[in-house]
Amino acid sequence: MHMSLRFAPVLLAALVLAAPAPSLARQADGYRMPPAPIPQIIDAEPTPVVTPSRDRKLIALIGRENLPSIAAVSEPILRLAGARVNPRTNGPIEARTTYLRSLSFITVNGGGEVKAALPAGLRALGASWSPDGRWLAMMAESADGLDLWVVSSKTGEARRVGDVKLNAAFGAAYGWLPDSSGFLARVVPPGRGQPPAAETTPTGPLVQESKGRAAPVRTAQDLLASPRDEALFEHYFTSQLVRIGLDGAVTPVGKPGLYSGAQVSPDGRFILTTRVKRPFSYIVSAGRFPTEIAVIDWSGAVVKAVVDRPLADDLPPPFDAVVTGPRSVSWRDDAPATLVWVEAQDGGDPRAKVAVHDRVLMQAAPFTAPPTTLVDLAERFAGIDWGRRDLAVVHSQWFDTRHETRMAVNPSRPGTPRILVSRNYQGRYDDPGDVLMTSLPNGRQVIHFTPDGRGMYMSGPGETPEGGFPFLASMSFETGKSTRLWTSGASHYEQVLDLIDDARLILLTRRESRADNPNYFLRDVKGGKLAQLTRIPDPAPQFAGVTKQEVKYKRADGVQLSGTLYLPAGYDKDRDGPLPMLMWAYPAEFTDAGVAGQTVDRSNRFTRPGGISHLFLLTQGYAIFDNPSMPIVGVNGAEPNDTYIEQLTADAEAAVKAVVDLGVADRDRIAIGGHSYGAFMTANLLAHTDLFRAGIARSGAYNRTLTPFGFQSEQRTYWEATDTYTKMSPFTYATKINEPILLIHGGADDNSGTFPVQTERFFAALKGAGATARYVVLPNEAHAYRARESTLHTLWEMSDWMDRYVKAAPARTR
C-alpha cells in the first residue's frame, strides 16, 4: 500500500470503543453490518426540526424518530395511479415518512420552553401551526388509521380532535380555518366497507388500445394496471370533506369524492376543490386524470365551476408543455375570496411561436363578473407573491433557456408590468434571493414590505467564488435595485429565516460553521447582539476531526470547476501520503458555460453524514471528493446531451488531475460513484475511460431506449435523437467496462425512469461480457433507501467494495 497508517489509531480507537452489540450482527447471507463507528452514527438521535409559528412569536422544536425497521418498511402497500398508500392507515407509507416523537415550544423573545405532553408511543406527522399560534395540529397514527390531534403551545396539552379517520392518500388531509376555530379535513367516508377483494381467476385479458392520437408520456412507476387497481384507487382515495371544530364537532360538507385538493378561501366563506374522476388511465398518474375544479360553499353546493378538464395523456414532450384551459387555480392570498388561475395561449405547446405563452386571470366573489387579466407572460407562469391591492410579484420561467423573470404588477389596475429580475435561474452569483413573507391574521402569507411600502425584504444565499454569505436585503419596486441590510460573516454560515422586528432589524437565523452544528438564533442587527435559541448537540462527534476544503480547477476547454475535498480525521498529507479516494458526483445540464463554471467555496458549512451517505467512508481511511462539477453545456442553441460523453470525460479527467496534483489521492486507487443520474454517470465513465479502478452505482438507469420519451433534462424523444440516446446508454458499451462495478437498487424503486429492471438487465449484460460486477437488490426499498437494515447493508457493500477493489488495488502497469 502507498499510504502510511500512522493516523489509523484514531480510527482503531473509535472501532474498539464503539463495537456493535452482538445482537446487531448478521449472517453472510443476510443483512450485513458496516464497520464501526458507522452503526453508532446511524443510530444516534436525529437532529430535531424547527418550525416557526405563523406570527413568529414561537418556534416548535420537533424531535424525530430514527430510521424505521425493515419490518416497518415491508408493511403492505398499494401502488396506485402514481402514489403509494398504506392500506392500514390510508396514509403515507413508512418509507416516505419521518414521524414526530417529541415536541416543545420555545418563545422567541426569551420567555422559556414548554414541552408537549405527548402520550407514550405517539407517532405523528404533518405538523401545522394555527394562524393565531395557539395550537400545533398533526396527524397521529393509530391501529386503524390517522387521527387529528392538537397541542397547546401555551401548556403543552395534547388531545385528539373529532371522531373521524383522516384520509391522507392524496397528501395533507387537513388545513386550518382562517379564524383558527377548527379545520377543513378530508376523512375516510363513514361506512366505507371492505376494500375490493382480489380476483383469483381472470375474467379476460387486459387490453389497451391506441387510436391514432399521439400520447408521448415519460416512463413512470406505480400506475394503474387493471380494473381491480381502479376499484382500489376509488376505495382508498375517495374522501368526505368535513368541518372539524376544536371542540370536536364534525360537520360533513357535500358528498364523498376523489378530492385531491380542498382549500378554504381567506375569508372562510368558500372552498376551492379539485376532484379527480373517471375515466382513469393506465399510462399517466392521477394528476393527469380527468379533473373538475370548482368553488363550493359549506353546504357542498357549487358556487363557481372553474374547469372540467379531460384526461391529459397527450401533452407534448417539452418540459414547458401544459394542459389547456384553467390551471394552477388558487385563492389570492391578500383578498377575501378572489380566484386566480393561468391559461396557456399557445395551446399548451411551448414550441408554438407566439408572443404570449401564458395569461394570468382573476375573478372575485360572487364570481359573476367576467375574469380580468392580471398579466400576459412571454414565459411559463411560475408563481405569485401576493402583497396588497396594488402590488404583487409574478414569476415566470422558460426551461429551454433556463431564464426567469420576476415582475411587479398592480392587481387593481393591470397593465404593463415592471421587470424586477431577468436572469439565468441556474446562476449563483447574481441570485437576488427570495421574497420574505409575513403572515396575516388568517394565516395567509403575503409580501413583507419595507416600512415605506416602496420595497420588499429579500433573503438569499449570497453565493460568491469565496463562499456563501447569506443576506437580508430590500428591493425597490420601482427599479428592482437591491440594497444589502445585513450580510453573514466569513467564519459562520448564517441563513435568514425571518424578519421578526422591522424597526430594530431583528432576524431569526440558522447559524453554523465548519465546527459548529446548526442552531437557531435571534440576531439584533442594529444592536449588534446575538441570542441563541436552541442548543442542538452534534449528531456525530466522531466526524469532528474530518477536514474539508473547496478545490477549484479547470476543464481542458477552460470551464471553471470545483468540488469539496474531505480528508479523514488524523490524516497528514506530508506524513501519510496519497489516499485511496471515492469521487461522488451528479451531472447537471447548462445552457451557459459561464453559469456552469460558477463555483462556491462551502468550507464554512457544517457537515455530518446520515442515511446512505458516501461520507461515512471517511471513517475507513478514504478521502472523498464530493460533488466535483460535472457540467454538460449546450451553447448557442446546441443540445447539451449531444456531446455528453465527451464533456463528462473532460469533467472527470480534470477532477482526477486536480486531486492527484494536490498530493492527497493516489491515481491508481480512485473510484467513481453516484446515485440515480450519478449511477448513470458512473457506468458511462467506466465504459469510456480508464480513470477509475472501480465504480459504485446506486439506483440508476442504464438503457435510454427504456425511457424513450425523455429523461433527466432531455426533452427530445428517442426517435428525435436516436443517436444521442444510444451513445448515452452505458448498456450499449457494457463490453467495454473492465473495472469492477457495484450495482445497488431498491426492489420497489418509485422514481420515474429508474425501474429495477434497468439494473437487472445491465447486470445481465455485464455478466455476459465477463465483467467483474455485483448486483444487490434491497427488498421493499424505494429510490431512496430508508430501513435501518437496508441503510447499514448499503454502507457495508460500499465499504467492502472499496476495500477489495480500491484500497487493496496494486499500482497499474503503464
Image (cartoon, rainbow, N blue to C red):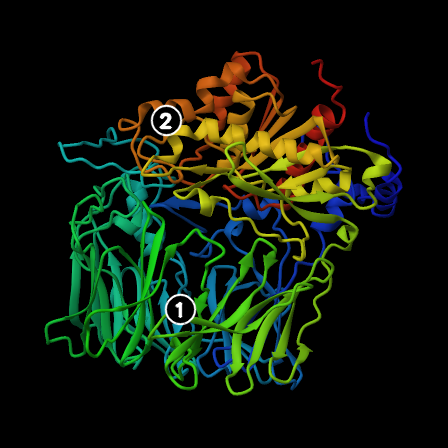
Please say if 36 is above or below 811: below
Classify residue 342 by image quadrant. Answer: bottom left
Image position of 409 (left or right of 26)? left
Mark 1 crowd level (few <14, some 14–19, many ≥20, 10 Å Cα): many
Q: Nearer the viewer, residue 398 or 280?
A: 398
Residue lying at 45% horizontally and 53% vertically, measured from the top left? 427
In the picture shown, does residue 671 fall above or below 91? above
Q: Nearer the viewer, residue 94 or 337?
A: 337
Q: Position of residue 705 (x, y in %)?
A: 36, 26
Q: Which mark is residue 174?
A: 1
Q: Is residue 738 above or below residue 568?
A: above
Quarter occupied by the C terminus: top right
Q: Secondary structure at mark 2?
A: helix
Residue at label 2?
725
Nearer to us of marks 2 and 1 is 2
Horizontal side of 366 relative to 7 (left or right) equals left
The foreground one among 766 and 641 is 641
Q: Secondary structure at mark 1?
A: strand
Q: Position of residue 130 (x, y in %)?
A: 46, 78
Q: Quadrant of the N terminus?
A: top right
